[in-house]
Image (cartoon, rainbow, N blue to C red):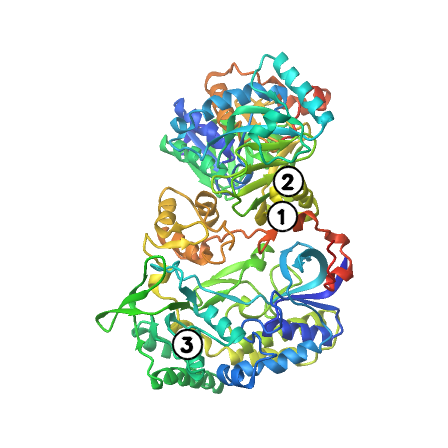
């Protein structure tokens, strides 16, 4: 079996930075990524983006280009199109690539699998024609096109970012329906500490909002009682805002309530997690270098708690430096410098987390709203299960099958945990979460049947098709 | 003053919950102590087979008794437990295996039981049109099926609770001793429960209790691995096993296919953890595809395993303590205890409440592990290697 000193999962800013730094210290390094090209979600397709597209997506996006180039030159083994489907307790990594599954082992694991969009259960969210704002950004980055008749619904910086990008691209959104309660602004402002980094973020945010206003995009604030309507397909969104009932038609409805750490790998490894009430999600319990309760496992980037691309890159560097330091390398003040820069980048977070906390309606959906899309379970069914004495998410999963479908709870886990906790009269702090079982992503049965496990040789790892 | 109940049950799996329910139905006051949550381990994560086929000969009477309860399970626990009727067939893949199952059927008939029948190749294909052409026949029990393990165990808990049984979940029994006529059970958190009778249903952790009663037993914690696939076109209305290879396969109502059979992962009973070993599970995937070619197009959605208690001779311990009065055991069901849960609970409640039972449980005595009584399971007793 091929062994690497350091294995990295995910080729976003966190993973690429970790791999660059790891290779710099001379460690044999491998990076697995599901995508065909490096960049993660934030820098998706940045390598070959046209100047025009770089203009649309902005400077922060364009800055990914040099990071990708540096990663390409780093000497780390890069395995694009690789789906990691299991990681064993001895850090054996099972992955699928080109239709074949293989195994490598690692001395240290750096998990950089990023964030997922928060589940947004609301009436009509399962209708065709409803997507997430993140999905719209993927379309924009990967294909440069997007439906020009889209309404954004929800809250979070991403809503404003993608709207401003679409405006630059000449396809302004039909409307923005924001769920942030007006009273939230005052509360959030009190969490603001105005240093230079925070001011930079605020300026960017204000510019994005101003762009939408200037372009004449109808903006509805403090929207409540939101429902997507349609028969067989989403046709309109209805809501109350400014004391009035509204119904807006469009062809695409993009939902967003912020992003949360993708917990699948750290849960699979049975790392400790805790409930973060500010981010309203579970985060892995990490030491000050990003190391898990399970030793030699590091979590960097948004998977460690939402911090954004700059924080992610710094955390990636920090983890690899820590591994170097532990291996006896002299890292000097490099680690301390990183810590200082990291805390500076984080000063804006309390403000953002307060302002863009998920809407009350999404964390407490109506009884009739579907929560688990795979198995079609409603919030009401989950509450009924609690009422008859089911103690937690795993038992709800066993009884109702919520979280047992192809998404393995990625789409419903947080919502289910919140609904159960509310019904029991607490917060998810003390609550359990779904036990995550491999494969992390669906795996063909025939591929497992021909899985070679530990006898995998490096030629397979390099991606040479070994099929007959 | 400490409350004294009639019966303290250690372990909230299907056997503990069923015994508690049946004891309550006989008017006993009961407390169930469960270190995690009800059905957390074997009872919640098994494949749900409700099967008499292929049982160890000594288990047949218990399995039959249990089947009577399964036949009317809703009347017992007010819940259908997801019980789905289906034949159970162990497929013979070649002539030698066919001979094995024919011998088995003859022996079962000789014991006076008629429930296991031989299927020739034509009959096999009638039941299983999708089975691979190399399969030559099989042995079957027609009138059984499968149920949903967590739903079932939870239903037993709820019904027991409705009859006054108290459940203390998240409390681990640490110390057990006699005080006067009573049993005392001290939990890790210091709380002490007192009962006239004690029942050890602690599964893979049962030796902790048995040792304290002065009768240590070899219970190995094992983690059988299971696979569930995406929904497939309906191709199988039978619970399928193999004769020589470990396999259990069933298609659920929603089309997903659950594949198990007993290949083991890694069990960590001290932390409740179990880990999948894919080099082993690979063989399960291979077997499923070779027996049902349609499975070559299936996709694994999830795999899982849970911790079960395995005895060295592959059959459970059921009966009285050999060293202590008013103490009883029902554990070590060796990966095939789910179907027996309703029946064993009834038997234990009868034994505790009346002092006797008509069901022959001598072969399951804990004394078989003490000194000169120790013996190995032998092939004459039939197969104990099947699982739910």
The image quarter containing residue B218 is: top right
Nearer to us: label 1 or label 3: 1
Position in image of residue B199 (x %, y %): 52, 28
Query: Which residue does the image show at 60% across and 60% down from the upper left?
Result: A293
Label 3 resides on the chain identified as A
The image quarter containing residue B161 is: top left
Say which label, 1 or 3, has the lower sequence index. 3
Position in image of residue A184 (x %, y %): 33, 73
- Residue A52, placed above or below residue B52: below
Label 2 to label 1, Cα distance in Å? 9 Å
Identify the residue under disc 2. Answer: B288
Q: Quick one: quadrant of the N terminus of chain B?
A: top left
Query: Which residue does the image show at 76% across and 55% down from the upper left?
Result: A456
Badge 2 element = helix
**Residues packed near mark 2 inside 10 Å, few (<14), some (14 to 19) or many (20 plus):** many
Identify the residue under disc 1. Answer: A445
Badge 3 element = helix
Depth check, front residue: B4 or B36 = B36
Q: Quick one: quadrant of the C terminus of chain B?
A: top right
Position in image of residue B180 (x %, y %): 50, 25
Position in image of residue A42 (x %, y %): 54, 74
Q: Quick check: B11 left or right of B220? A: left
The image quarter containing residue A69 is: bottom right
Identify the residue under disc 3. Answer: A351
Depth check, front residue: B309 or B284 = B284
- Circle number at residue A27: none
**Residue reaching furthest left?**
A243
Label 1 to label 3, Cα distance in Å? 47 Å
Nearer to us: label 3 or label 2: 2
Q: Answer whether labels 2 and 1 touch (C-beta < 8 Å).
A: yes
Q: Quick check: A105 left or right of A407? A: right
Label 2 resides on the chain identified as B
């Amino acid at each position: 079996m091929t062994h690497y000193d350091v294995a990295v999962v995910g080729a976003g800013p966190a993973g690429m930075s970790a791999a660059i730094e790891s290779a710099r210290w001379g460690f044999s390094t491998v990076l697995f990524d599901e995508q065909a090209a490096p960049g993660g979600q934030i820098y998706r397709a940045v390598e070959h983006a046209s100047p025009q597209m770089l203009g649309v997506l902005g400077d922060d996006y364009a800055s990914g280009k040099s990071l990708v180039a540096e990663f390409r030159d780093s000497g780390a083994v890069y395995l694009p199109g690789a789906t990691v489907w299991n990681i064993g307790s001895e850090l054996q990594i099972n992955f699928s690539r080109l239709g074949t599954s293989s195994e490598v082992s690692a001395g240290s694991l750096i998990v950089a699998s990023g964030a997922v969009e928060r589940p947004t259960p609301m009436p009509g969210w399962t209708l065709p024609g409803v997507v997430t704002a993140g999905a719209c950004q993927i379309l924009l980055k990967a294909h440069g096109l997007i439906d020009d008749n889209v309404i954004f619904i929800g809250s979070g910086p991403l809503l404003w970012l993608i709207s401003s990008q679409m405006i630059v691209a000449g396809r302004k959104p039909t409307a923005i329906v924001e769920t942030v309660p007006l009273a939230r602004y005052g509360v959030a402002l009190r969490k603001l500490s105005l240093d230079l980094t925070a001011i930079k973020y605020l300026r960017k945010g204000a510019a994005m909002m101003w762009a939408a206003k200037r372009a004449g995009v109808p903006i509805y604030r403090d929207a409540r009682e939101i429902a997507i309507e349609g028969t067989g397909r989403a046709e309109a969104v209805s809501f109350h805002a400014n004391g009035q009932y509204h119904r807006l038609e469009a062809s695409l409805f993009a939902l967003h309530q912020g992003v949360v750490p993708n917990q699948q790998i750290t849960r699979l490894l049975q790392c400790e997690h805790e409930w973060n009430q500010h981010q309203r999600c579970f985060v892995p319990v990490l030491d000050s270098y990003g190391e898990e309760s399970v030793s030699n496992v590091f979590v960097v980037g948004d998977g460690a708690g939402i911090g954004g691309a700059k924080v992610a890159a710094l955390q990636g560097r920090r983890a690899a430096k820590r591994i170097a330091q532990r291996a006896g390398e002299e890292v000097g003040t490099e680690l301390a410098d990183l810590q200082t820069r990291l805390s500076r980048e984080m000063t804006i977070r309390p403000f953002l987390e307060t302002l863009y906390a998920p809407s009350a309606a999404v964390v407490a959906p109506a009884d009739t709203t579907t929560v688990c899309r795979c198995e079609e379970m409603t919030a009401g069914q989950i509450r009924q299960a609690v009422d008859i004495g089911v103690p937690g998410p795993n038992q709800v999963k066993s009884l109702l099958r919520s979280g047992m479908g192809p998404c393995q709870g990625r789409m419903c886990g947080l919502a289910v945990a919140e609904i159960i906790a509310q019904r029991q009269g607490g917060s998810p702090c003390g609550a359990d979460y779904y036990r995550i079982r491999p494969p992390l992503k669906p795996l063909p049965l025939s591929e497992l049947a021909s899985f070679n496990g530990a006898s995998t040789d490096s030629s397979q790892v390099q991606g040479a098709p070994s099929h007959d | 003053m400490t409350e004294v109940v009639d019966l303290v049950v250690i372990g909230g799996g299907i056997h503990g919950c069923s015994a508690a329910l049946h004891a309550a139905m006989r008017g006993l006051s009961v407390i169930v102590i469960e270190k995690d949550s009800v059905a957390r381990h074997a009872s919640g994560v098994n494949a749900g087979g409700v099967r008499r086929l292929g049982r160890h000969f000594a288990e047949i009477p218990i399995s039959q008794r249990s089947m009577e309860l399964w036949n009317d399970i809703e009347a017992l626990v007010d819940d259908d437990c997801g019980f789905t009727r289906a034949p159970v067939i162990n497929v013979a893949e070649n002539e030698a295996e066919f001979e094995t199952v024919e011998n088995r059927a003859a022996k079962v008939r000789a014991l006076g039981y008629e429930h296991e029948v031989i299927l020739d190749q034509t009959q096999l294909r009638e039941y299983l049109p999708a089975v691979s052409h190399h399969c030559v026949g099989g042995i079957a029990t027609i009138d059984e099926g499968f149920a949903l393990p967590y739903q079932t165990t939870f239903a037993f808990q709820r019904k027991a609770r409705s009859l006054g049984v108290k459940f203390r979940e998240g409390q681990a029994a640490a110390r057990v001793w006699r005080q006067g006529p009573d049993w005392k059970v001290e939990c890790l958190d210091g709380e002490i429960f007192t009962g006239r009778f004690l029942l050890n249903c602690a599964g893979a952790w049962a030796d902790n209790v048995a040792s304290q009663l002065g009768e240590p037993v070899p219970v190995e914690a094992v983690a059988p691995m299971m696979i569930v696939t995406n929904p497939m076109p309906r191709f199988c209305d039978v619970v399928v096993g193999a004769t020589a290879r470990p396999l259990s396969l069933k298609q659920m109502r929603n089309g997903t296919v659950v594949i198990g059979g007993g290949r083991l992962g890694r069990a960590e009973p001290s932390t409740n953890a179990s880990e999948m070993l894919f080099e082993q599970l690979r063989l399960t995937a291979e077997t499923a595809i070779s027996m049902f070619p349609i499975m070559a197009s299936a996709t694994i959605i999830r795999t899982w395993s849970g911790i079960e208690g395995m005895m060295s001779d592959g059959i459970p311990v059921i009966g009285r303590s050999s060293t202590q009065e008013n103490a009883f055991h029902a554990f070590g069901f060796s990966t095939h205890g789910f179907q027996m849960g309703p029946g064993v609970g009834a038997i234990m409640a009868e034994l505790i409440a009346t002092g006797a039972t008509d069901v022959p449980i001598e072969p399951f005595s804990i004394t078989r592990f003490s000194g000169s009584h120790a013996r190995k399971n032998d092939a004459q007793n039939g197969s104990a290697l099947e699982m739910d």
